[in-house]
Image: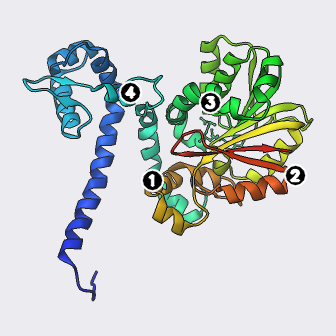
């Protein structure tokens, strides 16, 4: 390889640093995965004082030498505080982000699907050659659990108290007894949270991934709820009978190989005065705007290649929208084309998601 352009040594050094920074991010991400998977963060959070590696190893039933190396790396990455004399602790903020599954700031859960997400790297070169992507089932049950745990904190803390009351007349209908569908429901966490809060209503989840449906069945059994039903949308599709008061789609339209027929089916399934809550990834209309204004765009395009666009190209002639592909402009166009006439935007303080309230 040769280059006729002059090399700027400062820029070269900065580029090397940047690339190794990304390698560092990948490696430290894999350590966050281990900390979550092995219960190391939870054990640190449960302790009433800073722990030595021996103490943490005893509490987690692990080998001290491995725990010591992990702790040192975590302290060097500024995720865990080193307090001297071989003692390590999680700050209150670290506990919220890395250990407390019920905190709105919990982020470690999203790392649990990393091994499966990185494993598809072996299959993606073929996808680049053929054009054909991989469906969500390619990630197995654990990969689907990664998606579940990534989005669950918002469903547990914001959906029922903040988002539903902002929708026109929806809570009154749910309190009285309404029919609800969540399309692309994944592991069903959103539906289960809504069903717990509104026992008089009936909740139906539609999903094509058998692994997501397995997780949904397990979550439903654990909840003990009787007003939730999950449907395998491959053969048991959303009924086209204008019977649903509320339909939700959370972060799935951009993943769908064929979103237009799904949007048309939602139009036929919803009551004339029903409401559809769409959550999708916040993005700008053009690549240039995403490049200039979205600091997470690099990660988002990466997620797209690993999973979202891949899923959206997993069938012949897939739409291939990808992570940043379902923009507000496109949402307005596609819902309008399907016969929806009302469109309202909401901001539910989620840096990742845009929310649209769409009505016939
Ligand atoms: C990113 S996940 C989001 C899952 C869930 N809504 C959540 O927020 O946790 C996208 C989901 O859409 C599902 N999906 C894709 N195409 C679908 C379709 N045509 N009908 C129903 N679900 C679909 C995928 O299987 C996947 O579980």
Residue assigned mark 4: 96
Q: Position of residue 294 (x, y in %)?
A: 48, 57
Q: Position of residue 60 (x, y in %)?
A: 28, 16
Q: Is mark 4 within 8 Å of ligand 1?
A: no
- Residue at point 65% right, 37% down? 209
Mark 3 or mark 1, whichever is nearer to me: 3
Q: Residues within 10 Å of mark 3 (few under 14, many from 20)?
A: few
Quadrant position of ligand 1: top right
The secondary structure type at the circle numbered 4 is helix
Name the residue tied to disc 2.
339
CA gap between label 2 and label 3 equals: 28 Å
Tell me which numbered mark, 4 or 3, is placed earlier along the sequence: 4
- SS for tag 2? loop
- Dot 1 surroundings within 10 Å: few (below 14), some, or many (20 or more)? few
Name the mark on residue 260. Answer: none
Q: Is residue 198 above or below residue 214?
A: above
- Element at label 1: loop
Q: Earlier in the sequence, mark 1 or mark 4?
A: 4
Q: Which of the two residues, 261 or 353, is positioned nearer the viewer here? A: 353
Query: Which of 203 and 342 lies nearest the eye of the viewer?
Result: 342
């Amino acid at each position: 390889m040769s280059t006729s352009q002059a090399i700027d040594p400062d820029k070269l050094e900065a580029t090397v640093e940047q690339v190794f920074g990304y390698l560092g991010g990948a490696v430290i991400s894999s350590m966050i995965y281990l900390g979550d998977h092995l219960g190391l963060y939870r054990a640190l959070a449960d302790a009433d004082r800073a722990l030595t590696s021996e103490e943490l190893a005893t509490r987690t039933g692990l080998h001290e030498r491995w725990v010591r190396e992990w702790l040192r790396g975590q302290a060097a990455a500024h995720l865990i505080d080193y307090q001297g004399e071989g003692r390590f602790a999680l700050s209150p903020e670290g506990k919220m982000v890395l250990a407390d599954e019920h905190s709105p700031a919990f982020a470690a859960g999203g790392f649990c699907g990393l091994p499966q997400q990185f494993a598809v790297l072996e299959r993606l070169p073929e996808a680049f050659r053929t054009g054909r992507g991989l469906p969500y089932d390619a990630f197995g049950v654990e990969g689907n659990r990664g998606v579940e745990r990534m989005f669950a904190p918002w469903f547990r803390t914001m959906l029922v108290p903040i988002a539903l009351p902002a929708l026109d007349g929806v809570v009154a209908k749910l309190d009285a007894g309404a029919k609800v569908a969540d399309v692309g429901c994944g592991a069903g966490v959103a539906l289960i949270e809504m069903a717990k809060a509104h026992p008089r209503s009936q909740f139906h989840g539609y999903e094509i991934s058998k692994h997501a449906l397995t997780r949904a069945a397990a979550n439903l059994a654990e909840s003990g709820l009787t007003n939730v039903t999950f449907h395998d949308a491959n053969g048991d599709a959303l009924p086209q009978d204008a019977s649903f008061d509320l339909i939700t789609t959370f972060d799935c339209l951009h993943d769908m190989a064929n979103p237009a027929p799904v949007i048309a089916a939602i139009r036929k399934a919803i009551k004339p005065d029903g409401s559809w809550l769409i959550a999708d990834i916040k993005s700008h209309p053009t690549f240039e705007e995403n490049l200039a204004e979205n600091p997470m765009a690099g990660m988002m395009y990466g997620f797209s290649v690993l999973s979202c666009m891949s899923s959206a190209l997993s069938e012949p002639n897939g739409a291939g929208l990808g992570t940043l592909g379902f923009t507000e402009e496109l949402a307005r166009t596609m819902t309008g084309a399907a016969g929806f006439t009302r469109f309202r935007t909401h901001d539910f303080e989620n840096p990742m998601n845009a929310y649209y309230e769409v009505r016939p």
